[in-house]
Image: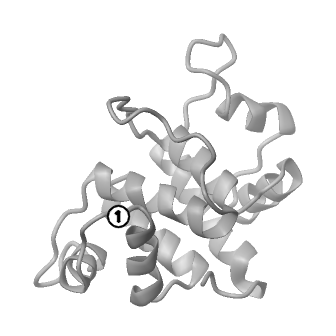
């Protein structure tokens, strides 16, 4: 999935307003203004749409973790670049929202993609592990759809 699509679906699922999203970026000291944020959250066919970068998505997820869980104890070294893939997006959302295995199972079920507990664990294994399960774009999309339904009864993230 494209970073802008993921950002939009997270915004919808967690019912985030632009002010909260800007606050999340500010927690990571990332320079983004309201105009840029609105442009990357527009539908690709809309006038004024701009593509979001993987950096913008990664910084947002890190800020969401910081907002929900507090200060990160030991940040990774500045020069350590980690490629953001669907598995890492899932992992960061799981950490930020404090989701346990049963929650993840329910979310995938709500997204009409039931996963066994062992398959769920395989998503979070090291890529070198023989049982590692690659999270496809369709799987991430189903998770985000399920997250929107799962989070519907919870207060918006603030």
Q: At x 38% / y 79%, what residue is drawn?
A: 22
Is residue 60 or residue 14 the one in the foreground? 60
Q: At x 55% / y 39%, what residue is drawn?
A: 87
Residue 141: percent from left, percent from top: 52, 57
Circle 1: element type: loop
Is residue 48 or residue 70 the one in the foreground? 70
Determine whether, in the image, residue 50 is placed left or right of residue 40.
left
Number of numbered callouts drawn: 1
Q: Image quadrant of residue 93?
A: bottom right
Q: Image quadrant of residue 14?
A: bottom right
Determine whether, in the image, residue 136 is placed left or right of residue 104.
left
For the C terminus, the image quarter is bottom right
Q: Image quadrant of residue 124?
A: top right
Determine whether, in the image, residue 122 is placed left or right of residue 127.
right
Is residue 25 or residue 105 the one in the foreground? 25
Q: Which residue is most to the left?
A: 48
Residue 136: percent from left, percent from top: 50, 40
On screen, residue 119 above or below 47: above
On screen, residue 114 above or below 34: above
Around disc 1, counting alpha carbons within 10 Å, would you say few (fewer than 14), some (14 to 19), or many (20 or more)?
Answer: few
Q: At x 61% / y 58%, what residue is drawn?
A: 71
Q: Which scheme is used to colour this image of the protein?
A: one colour
Residue 81: percent from left, percent from top: 35, 32
Q: At x 48% / y 70%, what residue is drawn?
A: 9
Residue 67: percent from left, percent from top: 59, 69
Can you identify the residue that label 1 sits on?
29
């Amino acid at each position: 999935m494209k970073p802008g699509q993921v950002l939009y679906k997270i915004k919808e699922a967690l019912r985030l307003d632009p002010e909260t999203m800007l606050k999340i970026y500010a927690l990571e000291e990332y320079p983004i203004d309201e105009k840029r944020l609105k442009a990357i959250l527009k539908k690709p066919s809309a006038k004024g749409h701009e593509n979001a970068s993987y950096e913008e998505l990664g910084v947002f997820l890190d800020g969401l973790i910081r907002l929900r869980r507090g200060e990160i104890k030991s940040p990774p070294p500045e020069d350590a670049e980690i490629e953001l893939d669907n598995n890492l997006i899932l992992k960061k959302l799981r950490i930020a929202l404090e989701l346990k295995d049963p929650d993840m199972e329910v979310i995938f079920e709500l997204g009409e993609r039931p996963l066994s507990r062992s398959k769920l664990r395989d998503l979070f294994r090291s890529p070198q592990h023989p049982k590692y399960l690659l999270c496809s774009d369709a799987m991430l999309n189903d998770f985000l759809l399920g997250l929107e339904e799962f989070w519907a009864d919870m207060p918006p993230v603030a």
